[in-house]
Structures are given as C-alpha cells and as structure tokens.
Image (cartoon, rainbow, N blue to C red):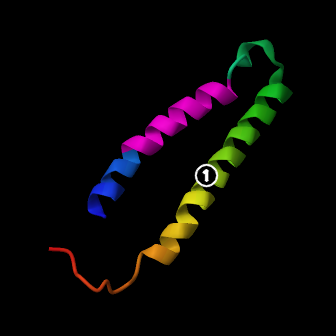
Amino acid sequence: MTALCGLSIPGGNLVAFILSGIIFKGIENTDSQGVEDMLNQAIMVTNYWITFICIPYMFMIKDKPILPPS
C-alpha cells in the first residue's frame, strides 16, 4: 500500500502534464474569455479526477488495519 501511495505522486504529475497539454492546445489563438473558459475547464477536470480517485480510498483505507505496517 505504501508503494502504491508513493507511485501515485509521479503518476498524478504525468497525468496532469498530459491533460494540461491537451486542454490548453491552441491557447495562443483565443481571446481572454476563451482562456478563462479553458482554465475553468481545466480546474473542473482536475476536480472530477480528484473526486473519482479519492472516494474509493475513503472506503478502502481503514483507521485500524488488521495487519499494522512493519
């Protein structure tokens, strides 16, 4: 479990770099309102992923595990 948590940080960074590149593609050709809309879209996508990933962890991680970490 510790290794999974440790790997989630670089994995999350990789996903964030890929998604931001996809979302902000062509940003130089838009006006300020378009940039603001794209930024709001990026924030919403990030929030969706955080919610999608964190909810299962709330049910899987227990306060007192059967086998404590060594």
Q: Amino acid at mark 1?
A: Trp
Who's the residue at 55% across and 59% down the image?
53
Establish if 4 lies above or below 67.
above
Most extreme residue toward the left is: 70
Residues 65 and 39: in front is: 65
Callout count: 1
Who's the residue at 68% across and 30% down the image?
23
Q: Which residue is mark 1?
A: 49
Residue 7, image x and y in percent?
34, 49
**For the stretch drawn in magenta, what is the main secondary structure?**
helix
Boundaries of the magenta span: 10-24
- Left/right placement of residue 48 relative to residue 62 reads right
Residues 31 and 23: in front is: 23
Determine whether the residue tagged by mark 1 lies in a helix, strand or loop: helix
- Left/right placement of residue 57 relative to residue 47 reads left
Who's the residue at 75% across and 40% down the image?
41
Q: Is residue 18 magenta?
A: yes
Q: Quadrant of residue 2?
A: bottom left
Q: Quadrant of residue 20?
A: top right
